[in-house]
């Protein structure tokens, strides 16, 4: 089995305090994986470490090669990133913000190509942001900004898409759009990894990585009973997993 992104004995710290303790994880193409766990468990730290955005020890492999061996531009073409509370210059137009996602594909100071413009338009359509492409970012609501930043990540057209709390500020219809988009990306053969607090949304992924105190408590299919038991356990039995109307959901206990 071929893994696009893998970690072995991964350790990472934030603010001088070790947060990840020897994590081992393998992620393959064509699957959407959601990372879940209690507050402070290390979910976002894990995602940042997988993206190479944090100093870490252990081994990180991208397409079987050590992540450190990839040149920054090559890596940026392979991994698209959407972080929490991402920012961009408020005076930039929506179109220009999304075009930033094409920088890894362009020579230094080169003008955007037809392929770049096509990728930006495709990303704007996918996030339902095309109608405000000429607006400055400052004139958008929080939810609209989130959709533009998601479009920027999609415009990279990377085989691996890492997203930290992508549903933040999105209303329910656009959350549903995001879920459909995540499934579509995986169906196209991409590796999709999302940190989510919304457990019912996370359960719609192909697999869950359940993090507890900086370690992987469980990694398994979202539909497996063992995954459901692990999810209930890590939240101290304060949630229960049920099958309702054809999908898995969580309810408070």
Image (cartoon, helix red, strand yellow):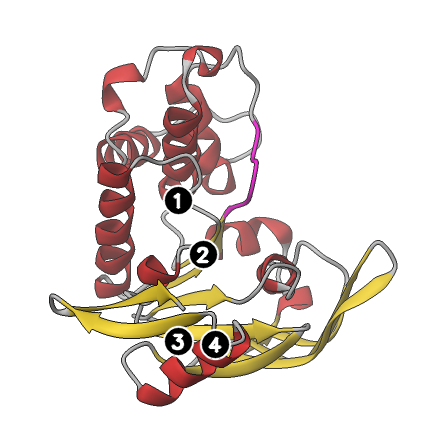
**SS for dot 4:** loop
Q: Residue 196 carries which label?
A: 2
Q: Is the magenta stretch mostly helix, strand or loop?
A: loop
Q: Which of marks 2 and 1 is nearer the N terminus?
A: 1
Q: Earlier in the sequence, mark 1 or mark 4?
A: 1
Q: In which quarter of the image is residue 141?
A: top left
Vertical position of residue 9 compared to residue 114: above or below: below
Residue furthest to the front: 253
Which of the image's four quarters has the C terminus? bottom left
Magenta residues (range): 82-87
Residue drawn at 49 percent across, 14 percent down: 92
Number of numbered discs present?
4
Query: CB of mark 2 within 8 Å of CB of mark 1?
Result: yes
Of marks 2 and 4, the one in the foreground = 4
Mark 1, residue position? 167
The residue to which callout 3 is attached is 28
Would you say residue 61 is visible in this rendering? no
In the rendered image, residue 37, in percent from the top left (x then y), is placed at 53, 67
Q: Which residue is found at the position 39% from the left and 76% from the top?
A: 28
How far apart are the two marked residues, 2 and 1, measured between alpha carbons?
Answer: 8 Å
Among all residues in the image, which is located at the extreme right?
A: 16
8 vs 84, nearest the viewer: 84
In this picture, residue 102 sits left or right of residue 116: right
What residue does disc 4 label? 237
Res. 158 visible in picture: yes
Please tell me whether residue 203 belongs to the stretch shown in magenta: no
Residue contact at pointers 3 and 2, CB within 8 angstroms: no
Where, by quadrant of the figure, is residue 127 drawn?
top left
Badge 1 density bin: few <14, some 14–19, many ≥20, Cα 10 Å: many
Distance CA(mark 3)–CA(mark 2): 19 Å
- Report the Cα–Cα distance between label 3 and label 4: 30 Å
Between disc 2 and disc 4, whose residue precedes? 2
């Amino acid at each position: 089995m071929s893994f696009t992104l893998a970690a072995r004995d991964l350790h990472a710290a934030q603010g001088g305090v070790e947060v990840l303790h020897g994590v081992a994880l393998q992620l393959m193409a064509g699957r959407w994986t959601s990372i879940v766990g209690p507050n402070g468990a290390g979910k976002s730290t894990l995602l940042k470490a997988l993206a190479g955005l944090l100093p870490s020890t252990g081994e990180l492999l991208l397409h079987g090669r050590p992540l450190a061996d990839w040149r920054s531009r090559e890596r940026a073409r392979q991994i698209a990133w959407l972080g929490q509370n991402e920012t961009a210059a408020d005076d930039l137009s929506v179109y220009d913000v999304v075009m930033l996602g094409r920088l890894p594909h362009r020579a230094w100071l080169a003008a955007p190509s037809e392929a770049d413009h096509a990728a930006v338009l495709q990303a704007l359509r996918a996030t339902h942001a095309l109608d405000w492409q000429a607006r400055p970012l400052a004139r958008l609501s929080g939810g609209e900004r989130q959709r533009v930043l998601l479009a920027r990540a999609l415009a990279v057209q990377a085989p691996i898409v890492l997203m930290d709390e992508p549903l933040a500020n999105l209303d329910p219809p656009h959350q549903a759009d995001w879920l459909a988009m995540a499934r579509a990306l995986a169906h196209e053969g991409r590796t999709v990894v999302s940190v989510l607090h919304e457990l019912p949304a996370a359960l719609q992924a192909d697999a869950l990585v359940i993090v507890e105190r900086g370690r992987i408590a469980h990694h398994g299919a979202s539909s497996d009973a063992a995954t459901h038991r692990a999810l209930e356990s890590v939240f101290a039995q304060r949630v229960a997993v049920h099958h309702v109307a054809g999908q898995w959901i969580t309810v408070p206990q």
